[in-house]
Amino acid sequence: MNRLQSLFHLWVYLETTPLLGLAATLAVYRLAMLISVRLRGHALASPVLIAIVLLSCLLLATGTPYTAYFQGAQYVHFLLGPATVALAVPMYANLQRIRRHARAILPAVLAGSLVAAVSAMLIARVLGAPREIVLSLAPKSVTTPIAMGVAEQIGGNPSLAAIFVLLTGLCASVIGGPVWRAAGVARWHARGLSAGTAGHGIATARMLLLSETAGAFGGLAIGLNGIITAILVPLLATMLAG
Amino acid sequence: MPGPVVGLLILFVGLVARGRKGSPAVDANLRGTANGLLGNLSLLFVPAGVGVVTQLDVLGANLFPIAVAIVVSTALGLFVTGWVMQRLSGPDE
């Protein structure tokens, strides 16, 4: 009882400082990594998903508003921007490979990017989703900071976009294998490029465990699709959102 | 265009320019920073993802269209990119 009380006092203290969100994010992520290893790295047992579910439950259970949590967590969130910039380093490291396959890479990423964005918006619209959701789905295949920026620009909701990005990455990690078998895609560079285009960093992180080539092409696809999406999705959105 | 994309392009062009001069484009400092950020990429998604708690009503009310749109469009994107890449590219590495 005493211990519980002191824990409660600690919580009350931390709740008033930005430290809470930061400490909770790092601690829960660490815990999520341990759980993920225990579950033998199944695609759905990703540390991101586990951490988000645990933290969300924690916020709801303690009645902590998201804004209070984000005051601390923003320091982690902020690093997404620099991390996106850092993608230039693996892209540069693969410059030779990119040059050699340029004629295949550009059409492949462009086609996959357009198909994913257009089909997501059309399906959501036909099934009766409100405009805000349709627009927030448009940039879902790219990495979070780009998706949030694009969503804001076209009148979607950045928070929803961030969630859709996450769900898309997890979805791509789970269905990648069966889809590639159905499409007859056996080669690692094609699988990696496909994972990076359709499932950004989350699907690519998984590919890295299987093949370095796949990881390299995945990283390349994340950067390229980010650029393509930032340019084309605002145009598509005005045509398709209705 | 979002700031991070602009930054990505600037860094990429800078690296290509530096590499042309013959010096190693990516020095130990830059490599360490980039690896540190990219190696912990999944952690960085967490704060934005927890934003789900503020959107539970909207998500709950539109669960079906969202789920179908995400699963189908992701499958199509994976299929098209992989298929085009395999068709157009020469031999692997």
Image (cartoon, grey):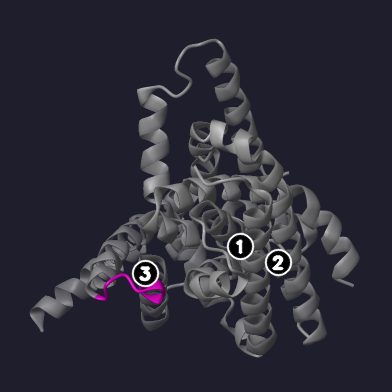
Q: Quadrant of residue A38?
A: bottom left
Q: Find out whether residue A128 is within the magenta segment.
A: no
Q: Residue at x 42, y 28 (%)?
A: B30
Q: Which residue is mark 2?
A: A116
- What quarter of the picture does the N terminus of chain A occupy? bottom left
Quadrant placement of the C terminus of chain A: bottom right
Q: 10 Å neighbourhood of mark 3: few (<14), some, or many (≥20)?
A: many
Give the residue type at disc 3: Ala
In this rendered view, identify the residue nearer to me: A211 or A173.
A211
* Element at label 2: helix
Q: Residue furthest front?
A: B91
Image position of A124 (left or right of B39): right
Disc 3 target residue: A51
Report helix, strand or loop for mark 3: helix
Dot 3 and dot 1 residues touching (CB under 8 Å): no
> What is the magenta range?
A39-46
Residue A126 in the image: state x and y as whole percent.
82, 84
Q: Position of residue A86 (x, y in %)?
A: 50, 38
Tell me the number on the disc at residue A198.
1
**Disc 2 marks which amino acid?**
Ala
Tell me the distance, in whole angstroms, between the alpha carbons under discs 3 and 2.
Answer: 27 Å
Q: Is residue A72 left or right of residue B75?
A: left
